[in-house]
Image (spheres, helix red, strand yellow):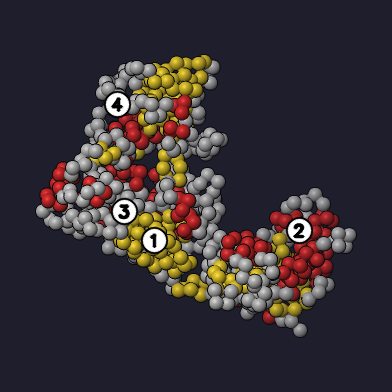
Amino acid sequence: MSGIGVFICHCGSNIAGTVDVDELTEYASDLNGVTFATNYKYMCSDPGQELIKDSVEEQDLDSVVVAACSPRMHEETFQAVVEDAGLNPYRFQMANIREQCSWVHSDDMEKATEKAKHLVEMSVEKSRLSEDLEKTEVDVNSDALVIGGGIAGIQSALDLADQGKKVYLVEREPSIGGKMAQLDKTFPTLDCSSCILTPKMTDVARNPNIELLTYSEVEEVDGSVGDFEVKVKKKATYVDWDKCTACGDCAEACRRSGNVEDEFNEGLDNRGAIYTPFPQAVPAAYTIDSEVCISLEYDGTCTSCREVCELDAIDLDDEDEIVELNVGSIIVATGYDLMDPEKIYEYGYGKSKDIITNLELERIIDASGPTDGEIHRLSDGEDVESVTFILCVGSRDEELQSYCCRIGCMGALKHVHLLRDHLDEDVDINICYTDIRSFGKGYEEFYRRTRDLDVNFVRGRPSEVNVQEEKVELNVFDTTMDKLLQVESDLVVLVPALLPSEGTEELSRQLRITRSSDGFLQEAHPKLRPMDTFTNGIFIAGCCQGPKDIPDSVSQASGAAAKASTILSKDKLQSEATIASIDDDICSGCKMCISVCPYDAIEYNEEDEVAEITDVLCMGCGSCASLCPTGAIEHKGFKDEMLEAMIDAGLTEEEG
């Protein structure tokens, strides 16, 4: 006669030191449906696993209960053991008598043993009602989608392409490169940012396994891991990029030349209606801004760019295009935006041209920037005699962004080095800081080197920044000297908080992935699964997950590519079996389950007027089952009768 086998683990002294395993074994052997019970020192060891396999055959067991540690630790281990023994893996139940019992009741063996009895009995009751479940197999498309063309997206795309995977790289701007393309140097080595980034951008353009979709945005995402269906809108560029050689004749002829704010240079100079973001842009081609082009937006009579283009590359009849992609995995690397410092009115951003952000300073210092690398007061072009940095503008602020931006301190230290190279040695440089955070490899050494460059470190945030006729005046209380200081500067540099990039909220809805309280994309586990999301097959990399520097972004990007590759390298995937199911005879068609499903796994069947589960999309969260007013939805492996039996077994006689 087949029955249930109970296997109790000592876990060394982790369990046996608090729980009387012999008494627990004797108790388990008398439970309803149990035909065999034993204990062993380490049930997860090879001998312990062999004990389970042999017992299944010798004792003719049809279900197995292991009382040991957390299911998170070894549930999959024991499911594999049970399957090797010839049983369905879902005929296995696990009672957590370590984390939920011995570790929290280490001072009372009697009570710990009694609690362990209840936990084992609950698992036995569930095991009596368990049934065979089967996983669904899905075919895997080996192509990948990377959303975001900054350094993280570039690294992920290159890693996947090098493994022979077809990669679609989507970037909303006309060129890949992201924020890193705007930097002059990188800390702590002061390498030329373009010298590092540009070869990688070129590698992307040349790689036959990468299809670049720049000036494009994701419009819609359906499907699930192994078979995502994605619609991407390629915005009209009004230039045939196959013909364009980026000669620049069209930009010179444009009637709006010099009249449109240049986004790449942070609005510090202007471009025309037809432009390329920066000289090293990839793809190396021009784009027409339809919102400012005279011909496209207004009277349609301007043909200046078309007239000078000898290659006939201008196409003013170009239209947006929807590209449909089928991919097996998705990596999101959409980067960050800077907080608008105008939100902190006391710092005076927008009231004077001499109050700028750190990214604006990057463009000013860059030799290819709006001032050709010359640093002067933007208000009147006069020489700069003093510069003051204000760190943590909006970050580490409970009313704005409570988190640290992670790159602000090191970026300011880098700018000190660059300013010392560009300005006279007698120029005063001040840094108003909360704490200097130099957390990375070589960062503390870099900080020490910076302190030797005659920099005034003021520990405190300015209470107010006043714009005077010739100077910008700051009042700041230095907590180190316990003194209120009045500082005058020609240039004030604000270091704002980092925010999720524009469109992150909408993209998270399209992809059915969650965001954390700070608005960044939520990882599945901050330590164990930092690149995974709660939607299988979708991974995150770089600053879309949270503020980080370039090395960490690149590392995470390579990790995300490796994670995606494990999926893309398979022909088929098995979806989880413990998912929701709907009884059509009971379903009232109220659609309440559809409204709460975070994975869009439920659809409404108009013909039968009932809800239907898409098995491959369901992640078994149980939200629908808990809400269903008619009880039509049950969770496979956690049916109502199972849960009720476990509750009854868990209650003491007094409580019952």
Identify which amino acid the numbered label 1 is placed on: Leu
Viewed as shown, does residue 244 lie left or right of 37? left
Q: Are marks 1 and 2 in contact (CB under 8 Å)?
A: no
For marks 1 and 4, the one nearer the N-term is 1
Relative to 45, say whether 480 is above or below.
above
Disc on res. 16: 2
**Disc 1 versus disc 4: nearer the observer:** 4
10 Å crowding of disc 3: few (<14), some (14-19), many (20+): some
Identify which amino acid the numbered label 4 is placed on: Leu
Dot 4 corresponds to which residue? 378
Look at the numbered disc 2 and give the secondary structure of its residue.
Answer: loop
For marks 3 and 4, the one nearer the N-term is 3
**Disc 2 versus disc 3: nearer the observer:** 3
Marks 1 and 2, how far apart at CA: 50 Å
Marks 4 and 2, how far apart at CA: 73 Å
Q: Are marks 3 and 1 in contact (CB under 8 Å)?
A: no
Determine the image quadrant of residue 125: bottom right
Disc on res. 215: 3
- Image coordinates of residue 429 in percent, x first then y, are 37, 22
Dot 1 corresponds to which residue? 145
